[in-house]
Image: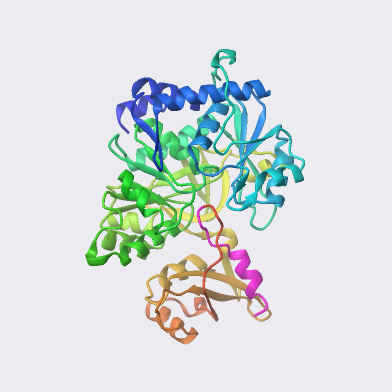
């Protein structure tokens, strides 16, 4: 971390961080979208006017404001304006619908709700009314405006809960995760310390800004003073024009994003680079098979660094560009100073400033932290001698076959090397004789020869996989089901679909 970034990381609040960066480099661009460009100075000035407009509406320090907005300049402006007022923000992923949105509004007791109106054919305003939301206002391309003279002083401390994020809730109601400005600044500092961007870089936010990765990335942008290109909708090849126009040097999001960029690279004629300016792919949020790392480096000619984070802890570990090839391919990187990792019976547990304060439900908080204040992640892993973290699966993703534990991730990593496998999810299915049987669900690349269970198990035997871990069922699907944020595979949907097969 350079001296300026290190000094800025001591900022008490997100508004303090923005104000200090705007003083340093007021004219340098920070947000780029289509033909639009907003400088650090403009971001501060415009956010203050929006903050005044919100204040006129009745938003005060501590007021809970939910917002469900796509990745746009206006969304960043609104979020920083709320940080200026000192409100409590509850970002909601824009793809969520009545069940998840209604739950978030009720549990957070939101007094205001910002929506995009009709977006991608869905009427968010009508849904908000249907759910009985309070203080509904549209914030897609217009925002409240007012005279900053009406505002009270900005928040002076960053340890109060001012953020309520929501876990994905794929198998039950989501959990409301409580964050402070300081926990988000700590997470973004970790990301920047690992990636080591410079003011000459151009980043990108192609995932929902309402995701915990939104402020995580913006903190890094503010610390290092470089711009980020915002993508309201991310789809390749359509988004390539935006990456090329703005000269993006750092891109990514998650493993699914890496695979999409790799697929586009393979379509380029005569070995031309899909994004000529690109030097680094980076992300996290989902397991990264080693073969994906090697393919990106080999075929795209860029570095790939992968990390480990979650809604409760936005950045835990991150690979660094100067790590060894082995560590970049097979680990999740190292934790920054101040992040403690403890392995207890194989489970990864965490303590540090970037860890959330808990959940809205006190019972969930009590269950999540151990007696020493470490967060139980539910992830399995171990630390190497160099301090790098290796994740081996999830507590809930261990298949117990005839009393023996089988790691789904171990099998998935091996199958990712098979040329007839585009993507794969390994799941355990109920079995009256075995307890659970191992099922591989495969998405094949275009033009691949149809995969059979016999060919798959023969390949795995050749890779040295133990016999008791071999899949006993193979399902080939057109596309694996994924969520709309970081494109994680939804294994519970596969279990529901194939449990009776």
Q: Quadrant of residue 416?
A: bottom left
Asked whether the viewer can see residue 11, the reply is no
Q: Is residue 172 above or below residue 445?
A: above
Q: Position of residue 125 (x, y in %)?
A: 68, 43
What is the quadrant of the N terminus in the image?
Answer: top left
Q: Position of residue 166 (x, y in %)?
A: 62, 45
The residue that appears at 60% across and 61% down in the rendered structure is: 396
Q: Nearer the viewer, residue 247 or 179?
A: 247
The residue that appears at 30% across and 34% down in the rendered structure is: 199
Q: Position of residue 206 (x, y in %)?
A: 45, 48
Q: Nearer the viewer, residue 74 or 181?
A: 74
Q: Is residue 279 left or right of residue 341?
A: left
Q: Which span of residues is magenta-colored? A: 486-501
Q: Is residue 109 left or right of residue 303?
A: right
- Count of marks overlaid on the render: 0
Q: Is residue 160 left or right of residue 201?
A: right
> Which residue is outermost to the left?
270
Q: Is residue 495 magenta?
A: yes
The residue that appears at 56% across and 39% down in the rendered structure is: 140
Q: Is residue 440 above or below residue 41?
A: below
The residue that appears at 52% across and 35% down in the rendered structure is: 74
> Which residue is outermost to the bottom?
454
Q: Position of residue 14 (x, y in %)?
A: 49, 27
Asked whether the viewer can see residue 433, the reply is yes
Q: Nearer the viewer, residue 71 or 441?
A: 71
What is the quadrant of the C terminus in the image?
Answer: bottom right
Q: Is residue 320 magenta?
A: no
Q: Quadrant of residue 492?
A: bottom right
């Amino acid at each position: 971390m350079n001296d300026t970034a290190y000094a800025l990381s001591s900022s008490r609040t997100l508004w303090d961080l923005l104000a200090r960066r705007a003083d340093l480099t007021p004219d340098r661009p920070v947000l780029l979208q289509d033909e639009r460009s907003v400088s650090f100075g403009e971001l501060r000035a415009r956010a203050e006017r929006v903050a005044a407009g919100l204040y006129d509406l009745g938003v005060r320090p501590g007021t809970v404001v939910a917002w469900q907005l796509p990745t746009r300049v206006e969304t960043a402006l609104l979020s920083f304006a709320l940080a200026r007022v000192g409100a409590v923000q509850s970002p909601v992923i824009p793809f969520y619908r009545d069940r998840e949105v209604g739950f978030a509004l009720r549990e957070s007791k939101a007094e205001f709700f910002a929506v995009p109106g009709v977006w991608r054919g869905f009427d968010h305003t009508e849904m908000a009314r249907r759910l009985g939301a309070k203080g509904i206002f549209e914030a897609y391309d217009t925002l409240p405006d007012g005279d900053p003279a009406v505002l009270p002083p900005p928040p002076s401390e960053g340890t109060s809960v001012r953020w309520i994020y929501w876990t994905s809730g794929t198998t039950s109601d989501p959990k409301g995760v409580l964050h402070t400005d300081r926990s988000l600044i700590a997470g973004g500092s970790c990301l920047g310390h690992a990636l080591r961007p410079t003011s000459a870089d151009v980043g990108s936010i192609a995932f929902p800004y309402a995701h915990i990765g939104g402020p995580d990335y913006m903190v890094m942008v503010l610390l290092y003073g470089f711009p980020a290109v915002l993508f309201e909708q991310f789809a390749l090849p359509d988004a390539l024009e935006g990456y090329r126009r703005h000269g993006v040097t750092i891109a990514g999001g998650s493993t699914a994003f890496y695979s999409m960029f790799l697929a586009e690279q393979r379509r380029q004629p005569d070995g031309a680079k899909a994004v000529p300016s690109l030097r680094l792919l980076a992300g996290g949020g989902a397991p990264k098979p080693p073969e994906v790392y090697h393919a990106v480096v080999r075929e795209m000619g860029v570095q790939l660094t992968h990390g480990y984070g979650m809604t409760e802890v936005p950045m835990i570990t991150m690979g660094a560009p100067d790590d060894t090839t082995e560590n970049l391919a097979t680990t999740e990187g190292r934790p920054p100073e101040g992040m403690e990792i403890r392995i207890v019976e194989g489970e990864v547990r965490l303590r540090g400033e970037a860890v959330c304060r808990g959940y809205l439900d006190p019972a969930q908080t009590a269950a999540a932290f151990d007696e020493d204040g470490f967060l139980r992640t539910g992830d399995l892993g171990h630390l190497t001698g160099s301090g790098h973290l290796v994740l081996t699966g999830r507590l809930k993703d261990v298949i117990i076959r005839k009393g023996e534990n089988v790691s789904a991730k171990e099998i998935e990593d091996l199958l990712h090397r098979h040329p007839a496998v585009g993507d794969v999810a390994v799941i355990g299915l109920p079995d009256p004789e075995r307890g659970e049987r191992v099922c591989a669900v495969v998405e094949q690349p275009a033009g691949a020869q149809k995969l059979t269970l016999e060919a798959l198990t023969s390949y795995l035997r050749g890779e040295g996989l133990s016999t008791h871990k071999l899949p006993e069922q193979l399902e080939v699907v057109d596309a694996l089901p994924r969520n709309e944020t970081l494109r994680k595979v939804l294994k519970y949907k596969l279990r529901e679909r194939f449990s009776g097969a």
